[in-house]
Amino acid sequence: MNNVVALAVIAAIGGVAVALQGHFMGIMDKGIGTKESVFITYGAGAIVAGLIVLASRGGNLRAWQELPWYTLSSGLLGLVIVGTIGYTAPRLGLAKAFTVIVAAQFIVAAFIDHYGWLGAEIQPLGPSRLAGIGVMILGVWLITR
């Protein structure tokens, strides 16, 4: 299988998982609340991740001290992501919630790339990327109105 195709398949599996997780988080949020659903989601994820790390005998876990300090905030950012998905999905609907979330993600990522913030490789925002952002904003408006 071509490397690009394999990566696209893996990315698509991730996309399916995100949509399903958003739906399940919305159900939990309505049933038990946002904080509680985030706790259950992260608790289950921590158990599975812990088992994977144990099975790999710790992997490269000791190298965490060599990482830039800001990368350690990814767990906190994950809580924000999971919490906002769980909170907005049942209130806006999956498509509207994910449209806004993904558009915000792409727009911020484009600026991180453009300026090389936080160690990102610089990828300039040219006219086509700016047009893409404009089309994305139009798409958000069309889907959420």
Image (cartoon, helix red, strand yellow):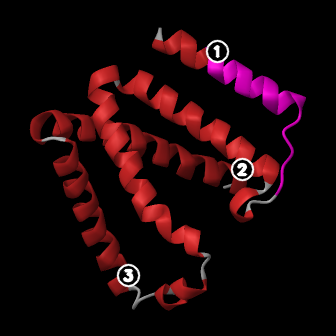
Badge 3: how crowded within 10 Å, few (<14), some, or many (20+)? some
Is 136 in the magenta?
Answer: yes
Disc 1/disc 2 C-alpha distance (Å): 21 Å
Closer to us: mark 3 or mark 1?
1
* Left or right placement of residue 128 versus residue 56 in this view: right
Residue under pointer 3: 53
Q: CB under 8 Å between callouts 3 and 1?
A: no
Sequence order check, earlier mark of 3 and 1: 3
Q: Which residue is mark 1?
A: 138
State whether residue 49 is above or below residue 77. Answer: below
Location of the N terminus by quadrant is bottom right
- Where disc 3 sits, the SS reads helix
Q: Quadrant of residue 63?
A: bottom right
User: At label 1, which amino acid type do we have?
Assistant: Leu
Badge 1 local density, few (<14 within 10 Å), some, or many (20+)?
few
Return the residue nearer the eye: 79 or 142: 79
Secondary structure state at the residue bearing disc 2: helix
Q: What residue type is disc 2 on?
A: Ile
The x and y percentages for residue 142 are 55, 10
Q: Nearer the viewer, mark 2 or mark 3?
A: 2
